[in-house]
Image (tube, helix red, strand yellow):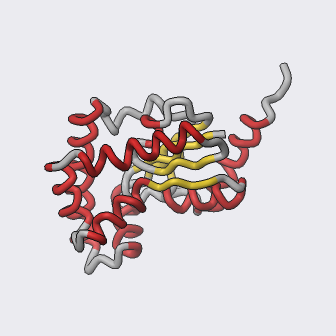
C-alpha cells in the first residue's frame, strides 16, 4: 500500500506520517525533513533556502524525483510532502491535512523555535508563496487544487491519534474492502 500525506507547513503532515509508519510498519519518506536538512546544511533559514531553491530548481526537482522513484519501487510506504499526492500518482490513499493559519503558526513557532509568532507567520507565508510559484512553474501544479485527494482532514480538530484513527480506518477498508 502507498499512502501520501500532504499539507501546508504546520498542518501536521510529519506527525501523522510518523504515526502511520509506526502503526502499520510502513517505511516513511519526508520531503520536508529533507528540505529542512538541506537548509540546515547550507546554514540558511527555510525561507532563504526556499529563495535559493527558487533560483535553482535542482533542489526541488532532486527531492521530488527521489520521492517518486522510491515510492514507485516500494510497497507499504508513507510518502510525506507538499507534492507527494501529485508525485505518487498511483497512491492507494492520498491525504491532505488542513489547519487554519493561526494554528499552523503556533505549531511552527514551537517546532522551529522561532523568536515570535509574527516572525513565524511572515516566514511561513513567504515560504508558501515561494513554493506555490515553484510548483506552478516546474510542474504546472496548483497546490490549492485538492481534487486529487481521497481524504481532506482538519488537523486543528484532532490530535495525531485522532487523525490516525480516521486514517487507520481508511487504510483497513482499503486493505480489506467489503464484499458486495
Which quarter of the figure has residue 16? Answer: bottom right
Q: Residue furthest left?
A: 55
Say whether residue 18 is left or right of residue 23: left
160 w.r.t. 64: above or below: below
Name the residue rendered at 66%, 45% in the picture: 76
Name the residue rendered at 63%, 60% in the picture: 19
Residue 103 x/y as whole percent = 40, 62
Q: Quadrant of the C terminus?
A: top right
Residue 131 x/y as whole percent = 26, 48
Q: Nearer the viewer, residue 67 or 110?
A: 67
Q: Nearer the viewer, residue 155 or 179?
A: 179
Say whether residue 131 is left or right of residue 82: left
Q: In which quarter of the image is the N terminus?
A: top right
Number of numbered discs visible in the structure rendering: 0
Q: Residue furthest right?
A: 179
Q: Residue furthest top?
A: 180
62 w.r.t. 147: above or below: below
Name the residue rendered at 70%, 49% in the picture: 168
Residue 67 x/y as whole percent = 46, 46
Say whether residue 159 is left or right of residue 98: right
Amino acid at each position: 500500500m502507498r499512502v501520501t500525506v500532504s499539507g501546508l507547513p504546520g498542518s501536521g503532515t510529519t506527525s501523522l506520517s510518523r504515526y502511520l509508519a509506526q502503526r502499520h510498519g510502513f517505511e516513511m519518506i519526508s520531503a520536508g525533513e529533507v528540505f529542512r536538512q538541506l537548509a540546515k546544511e547550507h546554514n540558511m533559514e527555510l525561507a532563504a533556502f526556499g529563495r535559493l531553491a527558487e533560483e535553482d530548481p535542482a533542489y526541488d526537482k532532486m527531492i521530488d524525483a527521489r520521492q517518486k522513484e522510491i515510492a514507485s519501487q516500494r510497497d507499504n510506504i508513507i510518502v510525506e510532502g507538499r507534492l507527494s499526492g501529485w508525485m505518487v500518482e498511483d497512491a492507494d490513499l492520498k491525504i491532505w491535512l488542513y489547519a487554519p493559519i493561526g494554528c499552523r503558526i503556533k505549531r511552527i513557532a514551537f517546532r522551529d523555535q522561532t523568536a515570535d509568532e509574527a516572525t513565524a507567520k511572515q516566514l511561513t507565508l513567504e515560504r508558501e508563496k515561494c513554493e506555490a510559484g515553484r510548483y506552478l512553474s516546474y510542474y504546472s501544479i496548483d497546490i490549492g487544487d485538492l481534487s486529487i485527494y481521497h481524504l481532506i482532514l482538519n488537523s486543528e480538530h484532532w490530535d495525531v491519534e485522532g487523525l490516525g484513527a480516521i486514517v487507520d480506518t481508511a487504510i483497513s477498508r482499503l486493505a480489506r474492502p467489503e464484499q458486495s
